[in-house]
Every structure is written in C-alpha cells, then in structure tokens.
Image (spheres, rainbow, N blue to C red):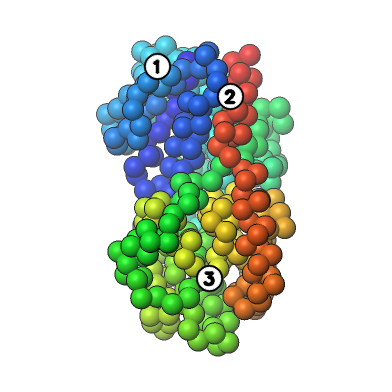
Amino acid sequence: MRVGIDAHMVGGRETGNESYVRGLVDALIAIDRVDLDLVVYHLGRPWMAASPRVGFRRLGTGAPIWRLALELPFRSARDRLDLLHVTYATPLWSRARLVVTVHDISFASHPEWFSARDLRVLSTFVPRSLRSAAHVITVSEWERARIIERYGVPENMISAIHNGPGAAARPISAADAKAELKALGMGDFGPYVLAVGNLQPRKNLIRLMQAFEASRARNSDLRLVIAGPSHHRGGEVMEAAVPLGIRVHFTGYITDRQLAACYSSCAAFVFPSLYEAFGLPVIEAMAQGVPVACSSAGALPEVCGDAALMFDPLSTEAMAGAIHTITNDSAVRDRLAAAGPVRARQFSWEKSAAITYSTYQKALS
C-alpha cells in the first residue's frame, strides 16, 4: 500500500491542522505493517529524516489551485500512489483513490465566522471532496453525524477517528517552563487563567473576557492569558481587551514548547469555544494536569467526559461562575487535575493511526 499524504500545512502556523498531519504521519510510520509506504508532500523543511518507510517530496507552490489542479494529480501518477490522503480539499483529478479528512463544517452553519475568501473556498471544495473521496474521515462522532445530515454521505463511507494530543502535551520541567515564559514576557506573572485559540469569532474570546472580568472581582490578582494568532475579525478581540489593560495578555502564535510552558504554569485552563469538532487544546491541558473548565458546545462533552467543568458558552454568567469555581474551589481543582491526565491517555496518535490504516484498506477494497 503506497499512500501519499498532503502535508502542505506543516510549518504554515495552521495550529490544529498542522498538529493533525504531523501526529498522524509520525504514528503511521511506527505502525508495524510492512505493506505501508508513505510519501509526504510538504512545503517547508521535513520535520524528520526520510527512511525506508517514508519519503518526503517538496511541493513547488503553496497556491491551492495549482496544488489541487496540477501538482498533486501529477505527483499521484508519477509516484505510483495507491491512495492519496488530503485535508478538506481533494485534487481535481487523481489516479489514486482518495481519502479526505474534514475536521469540521462550521462554515456551513456559521458563515459569519469566516472571511469571504475562506467561505468561498470551503463551500466550493468541501462538498465536492465529500463526493469524490473513497472514504471520509472526521474527528468525532458528533461531527460525523453533522456531515452525514448536511451532505448525505453514506454512513459506511465516513469514519470518526479521534485526534491524539499535540506536541504541547509533552512534559516540560519547571525550569524550562520558567525560561519559556520569560521569553514570552510572562516571567513576572502571578496566577493566570489560560485560553488557547485563534483570535476569531468562533473561539468566543470576547465573552470570555467579560466573564473573566466578572469573576476577577473575587480574585484581583488573577490575569487572563490568551495564546493564539489573530485570524478573521481578530481585531474585534483586541479592541474588546483594551478596557482590561494588563489584566489580559495576548501571546500571539507560539511554539509547542512555549504552549507547554503556558499550560504547565497556569492556575486553570478555560476553553469557551462556540463550536468544536474535537478540541485539541483541551486534551493538551488535561495531559499537563491542569484543571479544565470547558464549553459544552459541539463535540467537547464527547472529548472531555467528566474530566472538565462544563458551562454554557452563550452565558457569560455561567462562564464567570465556572472560572470562579475552578480557581477557588480546591476540591474541584484537585478532582479535575487528577481526572485530566487519565482522560487524556484515552487519546493517542497510535490509536488514531491504526484506525486510519484500516480506513485506507477499506478505501482500496
């Protein structure tokens, strides 16, 4: 089985999409199957050395139209692929069978969260890709049900395969975490609540800041740290933070190691998202032993189980109450800090890769 994987997003600061491809490729290589050869198509530098099981092929351009119309189709033929695995958008033609991962279809229900360009691209390519793929992968049972309902994908043609944790879940020593925080301008911070997500409407960060300020009246030393790059309408988040002054700190895009430092040093992790098909930051925070308060939207209850304090993301009052509880109630904090790593261990890239390998077999059968 010769499988090509489109990894053009690696190195492009695409956060969750990049973590997905890297985690999957690393785990597929480790599968004890002699009949699986991988060809990884990339733009930046390879993140590992080539081996008899995996080869890296540099793409000529990052422009999606050229990649999908010419380069990936040509490479699939030249490299004699049996199967090509892509994310969101399949090439316009391919001699190889196609598997597509569609992380979520939030663009279909909430177009206001997207730029005109991104909405046009997703609305055009995703429905077509769902029709052309031999098999579809998504990242939760909740999202699988939505895709089936919205686009009529046959149930036997789509699999829900949970993600593993990102690299920010790896342990980091207290000394190394302190050095990373100092480099981020957080060396003199006292206790802080951490949120992770791109600055965009879906992440619900404006409501989070309102809830934080309401809860902070009972803990005046607490700060809020928001880690993530600015995306569509990110300026609205920055503007809303102005009245809070230094009580809110934005890190911008940070590395996995910097993120691990932020997780391991925070008083609590809060994830207020309005829509998540999985929610990688929740698993990463849990793996670091951080007490987690989490939105009840989308697939987050499926992912968190009973290892997080859940709240309605549309209620500022409910969110403020959750922040107050998780930063002040020692019994709740201890329970969640103990439950988080146990829950996080249920998700692994090794498990995801094994199921993905089975979908490859299904797509080729």
Contact (Cβ within 8 Å) of mark 3 with mark 1: no
Q: Nearer the viewer, mark 3 or mark 2?
A: 3
Image position of 95 (left or right of 299)? left
Give the quadrant of residue 359: top right
Label 3, label 2: how far apart the Cα atoms are: 39 Å
* SS type, badge 1: loop
Give the secondary structure at mark 3.
Answer: loop
Placement of 244 over or under 149, stated as above or below = below
Camera-nearest residue between 244 and 152? 244
What type is the residue that disc 3 sits on? Ala
Q: Could you classify mark 3 by the number of other residues whose Cα lies within 10 Å: few (under 14), some (14-19), or many (20 or more)?
A: many
The alpha-carbon separation of the residues under discs 1 and 2 comes to 18 Å
How far, Cα to Cα, is label 3 from label 1?
A: 45 Å
Count the numbered circles shown: 3
Which residue in the protein does label 1 denote? 52
Identify the residue at horizontal 43%, vertical 77% (top origin).
190
Which marked residue is nearer to the observer: mark 1 or mark 2? 1
Residue 290 coordinates in the image, percent (x, y): 56, 62
The circle on residue 11 is none
Estimate the x, y position of residue 360 in percent, counting from the top left.
58, 22
Q: Which residue is mark 2?
A: 357
Residue 53 image offset from top left, x and y in percent: 43, 19
Rendered location of residue 318, percent (x, y): 67, 75
Which mark is on residue 267? 3
Viewer can see residue 186: yes
- At 65% from the left and 33% from the top, the residue drawn is 159
